[in-house]
Amino acid sequence: MCGIIGIIGKKNACKIALNVLKNLEYRGYDSAGLAYAQNKKLHTLKAIGKLKELYSKYEIIENEVKNVTLAIGHTRWATHGKVVIENTHPILSENIAVVHNGIIENHDNIRSQLKNKNVVFETSTDTEVIPHLLSVSIKNKNNFFNACISVINKIEGAYAFAAIESSKNEIFVARKTSPLVLGLGDGFNIVGSDAQSISHLVSEVIYLNDGDYAVLTESEIQIFASDNNKVEREKINIKSNINFLNKDGFRHFMEKEIHEQPNVLINTIGSLIKEEKDLNIFPEKMNIKNNYGITLCAAGTSHYAAMIGKYWIERFSSIPVNVELSSEYRYRSPAASMYSSMIVISQSGESIDTLMAMREAKRLNLTTTVITNVENSSIDREADYSIYTHVGPEVGVASTKSFTSQLIILLSLAMKLAFNNNKISIKKYLDFIKSLKLIPSFLSKILSLNENFMNLAQAIKNSHNILYLGRGILYPIALEGALKLKELSYIHSEGFAAGEMKHGPIALIEDGLPIIMFLASDGMEEKSISNLQEAIARGGKVFVISDEKNFGKISFIENKVLIPSFQGNWNDIFSPIFMSIPAQLIAYHVARERGTDVDQPRNLAKSVTVE
């Protein structure tokens, strides 16, 4: 959520900052703004809505600000205060401008203290306490740098911020939990929310550690740890990815990311297969012990991946698995004595809920592993062991290729654990590895059915409520399908375990209610079909996505899409990976038909960095 950019020492700083903010749109935002220093005075430019509104305002003053070399910018996702110009960042106090991600948890107390000093507040944001604290501190004969240090000693919460002062040619930055990365240029320096957004400008970056703060000038960067001692942090070479914002002919990034799964998952699978005979996963690094369980922890779509992982790991390795919501874990005083390992799943590696859950697991002496798409992200750096999905940047807010890659890793982990614990034979283990390599081409076959899912989307696009059903390992896919539909199309949709329908949800069924079921030939299909009969009898309009093996059993269902059956005995085991594609395509096509913002759904963000 929210994006930060700061640049010093390069002409056209305002335009450069705007372009970086464009790269940060995937994080989700509802307003945007710039602050820049010119002739030792601060100026701001702010707009509600998408960046095109800010670009329009910038074009009016473009010739006047070409020589500006100090600017900070921000895309805001509202937390404290409505979406109005006054609350749009940067937030000013006299000669100070600040952009901020996260939440200042003690802002109410600080606000009261400052009001007692006759400070006048003009916004309802928690951020505003930062520039006011800076102004008060400077008036108390502190210089800008020392004033900034005094502020970070007073504020509490998870945050990242950048501050500038009109007479100082420098940027002060600080982070606590929320990410910040510094970019080293030739005669200029940059700070941003992630490395990808600035990779077209610099070739080297520095990731700030939690608790670090830094001062950037055009010629140098000084970094300090939380103990106020000056430190050196590793410089990391990055390569500019010119395809980051390229839709490759697709209408939306999400559409591109759905259709590129056969190609990018080759990278995931290639990273897992070790010399054709083994999987490049090391349970010993995860501290997975006999007679101890594993906790899987994640949020949103990644949480549904964890639920599927539980089915696989327990089925094949007989190791008990506990699945936790990241946002709940550390607040419920979890008992951890029966667990030795926590595996967290995060596409961005910056999800604050998941990071804090992992820290709680560390406090409870669990060894931590992360499954993530972003190397050097906050969670990656703090985890004891990391497994990367390697699917490249995912711009669309709704996760697609990251979800399927997470599933592939979780299934591979289940098989590696099963083999190590002598629960499966070497023959089955090698057959799994062989079958794993066939997934990309098989997904291409499912994607070739795209028109069928477009037709299904046409049939449900005007609905107000939709139910998704699944049984067994496809129950989490029903949850994921419902989540995708509601977040993209804004249609109310719910996912249920098919066997639970008669325990309550059946009361929702009325004439014409769309019901979408994911069905696999897994030995439980007869029970699932019986659940469908109950829905049809009550007027529900049933749509079934099933593998071809069930064709004869569901001939009475008019609306169905049959996907190919996978080879050998792996069809039902791989089915969550295969059924993910229909879930994504249905949601995408319904949203496109309804004209919603597919890549940036309202109120949502790609990287959730506030609790």
Image: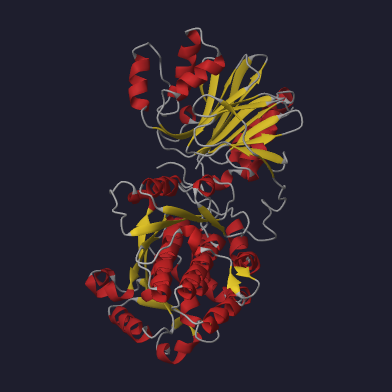
Identify the residue shown where x is 46% and y is 61%: 484
Vertical placement of 74 versus 544: above or below?
A: above
In the figure, is residue 596 to the left or right of 306? Answer: right
Vertical placement of 4 versus 312: above or below?
A: above
x, y percentage for residue 279?
57, 70
Classify residue 258 by image quadrant.
bottom right
x, y percentage for residue 101?
49, 35
Nearer to us in this view, 288 or 106: 288
In the figure, is residue 517 to the left or right of 584? Answer: left
x, y percentage for residue 323?
36, 61
Vertical placement of 288 versus 383: above or below?
A: below
x, y percentage for residue 445?
61, 78
The quarter of the rendered structure image containing the C terminus is top left
Quick one: which residue is furthest to the right in this view?
Answer: 186
The number of discs equals: 0
Identify the residue shown where x is 30% and y is 46%: 331
- Please say whether residue 564 is visible from this viewpoint: no
Nearer to us in this view, 604 or 163: 163
In the figure, is residue 584 to the left or right of 183? Answer: left
The image's colour scheme reads secondary structure
Vertical placement of 439 versus 268: above or below?
A: below
- Please say whether residue 396 is visible from this viewpoint: yes
Classify residue 214 by image quadrant.
top right
Classify residue 145 by image quadrant.
top right
